[in-house]
Image (tube, grey):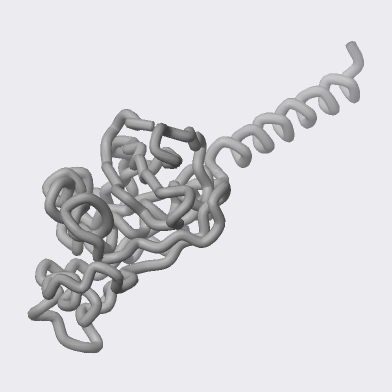
Amino acid sequence: MSKNKITRLASGLLTAVALVSTFTVGVSNAAFANSNSLPEGTVVFYSLESQDSYYGTPILDRSSATAPRVQTRLNPVTIGLCNSGFGEVVVSSFTSKFDGAVKLKCGDSAAGYVHIRTNHRSQWQAQMGGPGLWDDYMVWASAQALSAPSLANTQAGNKRCYTTPIEVFQVINGAQTYWKTIRPSVVVSMNNKIVITSIPSTVSTC
């Protein structure tokens, strides 16, 4: 084989390796490019399907936080109305892939925000793995499952269950270190267009 052919072959192999490397790690690097300045121990969540990431200023108690420190996806006044029993108040609105616009209402013990808080709050807090507001995380993860599901199954009672993989990273020594993948399962009423429940787990319940 001539020297020129060997040179061209080597050049081609290097180009191929570079392309494979870019394809393999490019998405994560792009998604978290602005997270290098995050404090040590910050937990970062990344949706594989939507390629959206989430992290926020650690706030342990929404009721004691004051502007401009409040970094919350939910209105404290709305949560107060939920606490006062106003079940029809809308906590958050989503766009789902198969059921269009759906709403998370305050609800009651059977469905909605109150149901999720009563039955699954401790699970969401455990999956977070760090400081912050459990329901902010729940709303973000639910939005990813609804808008960009990896799977959506119809269930009895005119319900549909959405799920999607969420990768969880921790900032350790200034770098993001993979921790685990969770697969939140969000159940909606197909006819009422409301969120019934949102359950975090490493294995989908859909």
- Residue at point 32%, 29% (across, down): 203
- Residue at point 44%, 47% (across, down): 145
The one of 194 and 49 positioned closer to us in this rendering: 194
Q: Quadrant of residue 89?
A: bottom left
Left or right: residue 195 versus residue 130 is right
Q: Quadrant of residue 201?
A: top left
Q: Quadrant of residue 41?
A: bottom left
Looking at the image, residue 67 lies above or below residue 188: below
Left or right: residue 70 versus residue 168 is left
Position of the N terminus by quadrant: top right
Number of marks present in the image shown: 0
Q: Position of residue 12 (x, y in %)?
A: 79, 29
Q: Position of residue 67 (x, y in %)?
A: 22, 88
Position of the C terminus by quadrant: top left
Looking at the image, residue 175 lies above or below residue 167: below
Left or right: residue 77 versus residue 84 is right
Q: Position of residue 5 (x, y in %)?
A: 89, 21
The one of 43 and 92 positioned closer to us in this rendering: 92
Left or right: residue 168 versus residue 11 is left
- Residue at point 51%, 53% (across, down): 96
Asked if one can make out residue 130 in the rendered structure from this viewpoint, the answer is no
The one of 176 and 109 positioned closer to us in this rendering: 109
Looking at the image, residue 194 lies above or below residue 78: above
User: As drawn, which residue projects farthest toward the top?
Assistant: 1
Looking at the image, residue 82 lies above or below residue 36: below
Asked if one can make out residue 94 in the rendered structure from this viewpoint, the answer is yes
- Residue at point 21%, 52% (across, down): 116
